[in-house]
Amino acid sequence: MKAAVCNAYGPAENVHITDVPKPEPGDDEVLIRVIASDVNIADVRIRALRAPDGPKLLGNLFMRLMLGLTRPKVSVFGLNLAGTVEAVGRNVTRFKPGDKVFGSAGFDMLCHAEYRCLPQNGQLKLIPEGMSYADAVALLFGGMTALTFFQCAKLENGEKVLINGASGAVGTSAVQIAKHSYGCHVTAVCSGRNADLVRSLGADEVIDYTKQDFREGDEKYDVIMDCHGNAPLKQVEHMLTGKGRQLMVIGSLWDLMTGSSKKQVVTGEELGKDHAFSQAIIDELTALAVGGKLKPVVDRVVPFEDIVEAHRYVDTGRKRGILVLDITGEAA
C-alpha cells in the first residue's frame, strides 16, 4: 500500500509517498480503507522538530526524547482518519465490512496511508448519515482537543472565555463548543481576515491581533485558551478572574516551568492520552455535530499526492480550520 513517510526531521520535502506493507487486523481490530485524513499542526511540528516558543535547546531536546533522537520514531504521520471497513478480526462485533467510520489513532499516528488498523473498542465510530468523509475527519483534531480541554477545566455554563488563535483547527471548534454547548460569552482573537468566519461560528466579540495586543487588555475572563502559543500564563494572568483558568493548548515547557501557580493551568500533558483520545469524547463530539452545535470548518481538500504541498500550507500558519488529505479522491 501507499503511505506518506518521513524518515528525517526537516522541511516538508522530507515527506514522500512510498510503498509499505499493508497491515493485517488482529482479532479485536478493524482494517480500514482510509479515504480521508488531515494534516494539522501536530504533524508539521513533529516533522520539523519545531517546539513552541521558548528556549530552543530545551524544547528541541524534549521533543527528541519524546519523538526520536535522530529521526521520527513513527515515520508515517496522521492522527485521524475516515474511511470504510474492509475487514474485521474474528472477535469484532461493533463493525462489519462496508461500514463508513471515522476515528483517531492519537499519537500512534499512521493514518497518512491507504490502510490503517484500529481496535474496535478504540476511538472509532460510524459516520453519521449524510456526513462526508472530509467533514467527519475534520471534526476530530480540533473538536476532540477543544472539548477535552474544556472538560478538564470544568468549563461552566455562561462563563467568559477568550480563545487565542480562534480561526485554526482547535479555535474554530472551541468557539462553537463554548458558545453553543456551554452558553459562554466568547471573545475570539484572530486576524481581521478571519473575523467574519469566527463571528459566524458564534464569537460574541473579535479582537484583531494585527491591530490590538489582547494581552495588554484589562478585561477579565474565566477561561483563556491559548491555541497559538504566544499567551503564556505570566502574560495573561492579570486578565483572569479569581477562579480563572488558562488552557495551554500550545505552549512551551519553559512557559510551564516559569508560570505562576496562583491560577489553574491545564496543559496537554494533564489531559492524559486516555482522556484526550477517548470513545466518550468522540461520542459527545458526534452528538454536537448531529445536533447542529458543531460544524466542521474545512480550509481545503488536498489530494494525497500533494502531501508536500499540504505540509507547506500548514507551515504558513494561515490555515483556517482543517486541511483534509484526500487519500483516494472520494473524501468530499
Image (spheres, rainbow, N blue to C red):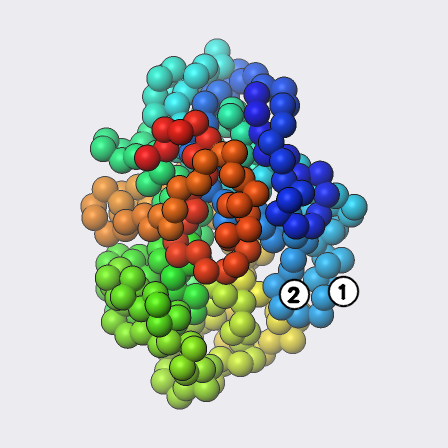
Q: Which of the 4 image quadrants contains residue 290?
A: top left
CA neighbours of label 2 inside 10 A, class few (<14), some (14 to 19), many (20+): some
- Residue pictured at 66% horizontal, 70% vertical: 54
Q: Position of residue 122 (x, y in %)?
A: 47, 32
Question: Nearest the camera: 169 or 106?
Answer: 169
Q: Which of the 4 image quadrants contains residue 110?
A: top right
Question: Nearest the camera: 325 or 124?
Answer: 325
- Decide: is 251 above or below 93: below
Q: Is residue 4 left or right of residue 327?
A: right
Q: Position of residue 224 (x, y in %)?
A: 42, 71
What's under tag 1, amino acid-wise?
Leu
- In this figure, which residue is indicated by the disc labeled 1? 57
Q: Secondary structure at mark 1?
A: helix
- Most extreme residue toward the top is 90
Question: Nearest the camera: 121 or 167?
Answer: 167
Q: Which mark is residue 253?
A: 2
Of label 2 and label 1, which has the lower sequence position? 1
Image quadrant occupied by the N terminus: top right
Image quadrant occupied by the C terminus: top left
Question: Nearest the camera: 8 or 254?
Answer: 8
What's under tag 2, amino acid-wise?
Leu
- Decide: is 151 above or below 112: below
- Residue pictured at 66% horizontal, 39% vertical: 6
- Residue pictured at 28% horizontal, 74% vertical: 205
CA neighbours of label 1 inside 10 A, class few (<14), some (14 to 19), many (20+): few
